[in-house]
Each structure stands twice: as structure tokens, then as C-alpha cells.
């Protein structure tokens, strides 16, 4: 859904309320999944550190960094779309406030 809504957002036309909500929910789900993964990995990392298992800690840190990078890329992506396409093409105050929110 995120990829489809990205294409719509890049058309440089004002999104309807439904389209804005689909874009928002799509990114919320993608980011939410990564955040949940990050929390689980951080918890496991702490448990492994307390056990003194440095080999597992090293592996988990690598996975956690990968998830952090994915999160950063996703956030940069949507912020870029909002700044370059959505805000400039929004004519209503409601849409502009939605994007800044």
C-alpha cells in the first residue's frame, strides 16, 4: 500500500481525505512493524548482555542497526515526499496542517 500511495503522492496533485488517510495508515503500519522489531531486539540484547553472551549480543546489535537504518530510510522517504510534493500541492489549510502533523 505504501508504494502505491507514494506514486499517487508524487503526482503533485492535492490528495483527498481518503488518500491522505491511506498514506498515513500505510506508513504508520510500516514504521510500527519496524519499531516493534526494534523493541524486541533491544530487549533480547539486554538479556543476552546480562547473561554475558557477547557473541549473541554482537549479532543482535547488527540486526538492530539494520532495523534502525530501515526506520531512518522510511522516515526520510516520507518527509521528502511531504516536503517536495504534498505541501506544495496542497491548497487547503486542512491538508497542510495534516502534513505538518
Image (cartoon, rainbow, N blue to C red):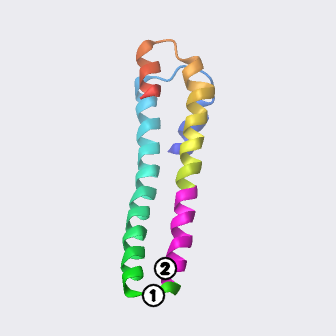
Residue located at (38% from left, 63% from top):
39
Residue located at (42% from left, 70% from top):
41
Local SS, label 1: loop
Residue hosting label 2? 57
Residue located at (45% from left, 50% from top):
31
5 with respect to 25 (left or right): right
Quarter of the image with the C terminus in it: top left
Displayed quadrant of residue 58: bottom right
Q: Position of residue 52 (x, y in %)?
A: 42, 87
As drawn, 77 above or below 12: below
Displayed quadrant of residue 47: bottom left
Residue hosting label 1? 53
Local SS, label 2: helix
Residue located at (52% from left, 44% from top):
2
The rendered magenta stretch, by its main secondary structure, is classed as: helix
Q: Position of residue 80 (x, y in %)?
A: 61, 35
Chain part drawn in magenta: 56-69
Contact between labelled residues 2 and 1, with CB atoms less than 8 Å apart: yes
Mark 1–mark 2 Cα distance, whole angstroms, equals 6 Å
Task: Check residue 98 for magenta coloring.
Answer: no
Amino acid at each position: 500500500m505504501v508504494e502505491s500511495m507514494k506514486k499517487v503522492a508524487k503526482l503533485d496533485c492535492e490528495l483527498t481525505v481518503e488518500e491522505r488517510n491511506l498514506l498515513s495508515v500505510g506508513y504508520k503500519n510500516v514504521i510500527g512493524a519496524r519499531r516493534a522489531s526494534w523493541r524486541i531486539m533491544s530487549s533480547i540484547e539486554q538479556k543476552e548482555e546480562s547473561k554475558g553472551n557477547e557473541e549473541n549480543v554482537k549479532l543482535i546489535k547488527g540486526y538492530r542497526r539494520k532495523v534502525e537504518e530501515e526506520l531512518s530510510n522510511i522516515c526520510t522517504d516520507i518527509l521528502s515526499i511531504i516536503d517536495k510534493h504534498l505541501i506544495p500541492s496542497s491548497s487547503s489549510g486542512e491538508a497542510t496542517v495534516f502534513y505538518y502533523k
